[in-house]
Image (cartoon, coloured by chain):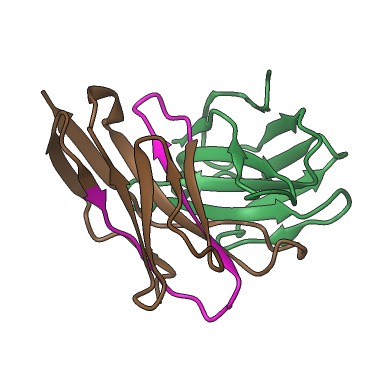
Chain colours: A brown, B green
């Protein structure tokens, strides 16, 4: 079974509008972390935002917010006021197991390509 | 601020040739990782090293070997390259603090003919 599912291969959004990128996850660990990364056409991986499974509030970082619905096992990324520079691939990822174990590797979804139109 | 440095950035190999991808980080991180990225499949973990002196297989380890040379360096070796290993390879590192996010290198594009 897929651990991270991103069902939107591609999305379009108008500049200055908000957009939601979907991510669902599957884990039986009570302690886990959820991440979003951005990959522009230049290829580098840029960390955007993190949500811990025990965090009570949704994470926010500037124009990025993570809509965390634990019971539904979803961790959607919301980008407000889209900019042309937001055009990129976006990956959702999960780390299972507590931080004090060796298993700190992330499992990634297949990504969503976002195109911001002027 | 170098962060995570990978070499080479581009490489073309013939089937059966060997090569080593080098990775070094200057953030004093304990954990290092090698991922491969193929179209439509996101990033898949090849090997990781939780700390100096340890390495473990990830999701797709077949055809690869790794060496954690010291705390800074983590290399990935293809002993006998195959066309199926054509991919973009990312090295990453992380530490056991805060969010523990992965810091990535710029990637190495490998083509096996």
In the image, residue A65 lies at what x, y percent? Answer: 37, 47
Q: Is residue B32 left or right of residue B28?
A: left
The residue at the far top in this view is B1
Please say whether residue B49 is one of the residues in the magenta stretch.
Answer: no
In the image, residue A20 lies at what x, y percent? Answer: 24, 50
The residue at the far front in this view is A57
Q: Is residue A54 left or right of residue A7?
A: right
Q: Which is nearer the eye, A16 or A118?
A: A16
Which stretch did the figure color magenta?
A20-45
Q: Is residue B13 left or right of residue B76?
A: left
In the image, residue A22 lies at what x, y percent? Answer: 28, 58
Q: Residue at x 35, y 54 (%)?
A: A110
Q: Residue at x 60, y 60 (%)?
A: B62
**The quarter of the displayed image where residue B3 is located:** top right
In the image, residue A84 lies at what x, y percent? Answer: 22, 24
The quarter of the image holding the N terminus of chain A is: bottom left
């Amino acid at each position: 079974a897929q651990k991270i599912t991103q069902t939107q291969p591609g999305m379009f959004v108008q500049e200055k509008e908000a957009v939601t990128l979907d991510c669902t996850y599957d884990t039986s660990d009570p302690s886990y972390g959820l991440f979003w990364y951005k990959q522009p056409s230049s290829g580098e991986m840029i960390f955007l935002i993190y949500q811990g499974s025990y965090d009570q509030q949704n994470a926010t970082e500037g124009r990025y917010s993570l809509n965390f619905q634990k019971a539904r096992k979803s961790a959607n990324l919301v980008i407000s006021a889209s900019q042309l520079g937001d055009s990129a691939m976006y990956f959702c990822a999960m780390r299972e197991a507590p931080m004090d174990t060796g298993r700190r590797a992330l499992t990634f979804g297949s990504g969503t390509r976002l195109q911001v139109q002027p | 601020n170098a962060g995570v440095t990978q070499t080479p950035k581009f490489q073309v190999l013939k089937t059966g040739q060997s090569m080593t991808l080098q990775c070094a980080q200057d953030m004093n991180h304990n954990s290092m990782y090698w991922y491969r990225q193929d179209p439509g499949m996101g990033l898949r973990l090849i090997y990781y090293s939780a700390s100096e002196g340890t390495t473990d297989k990830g999701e797709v380890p077949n055809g690869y070997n790794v060496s954690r040379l010291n705390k800074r360096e983590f290399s990935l070796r293809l002993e006998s390259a195959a066309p199926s290993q054509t991919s973009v390879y990312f090295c990453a590192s992380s530490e056991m603090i805060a969010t523990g996010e992965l810091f990535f290198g710029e990637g190495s594009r490998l083509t096996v003919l």
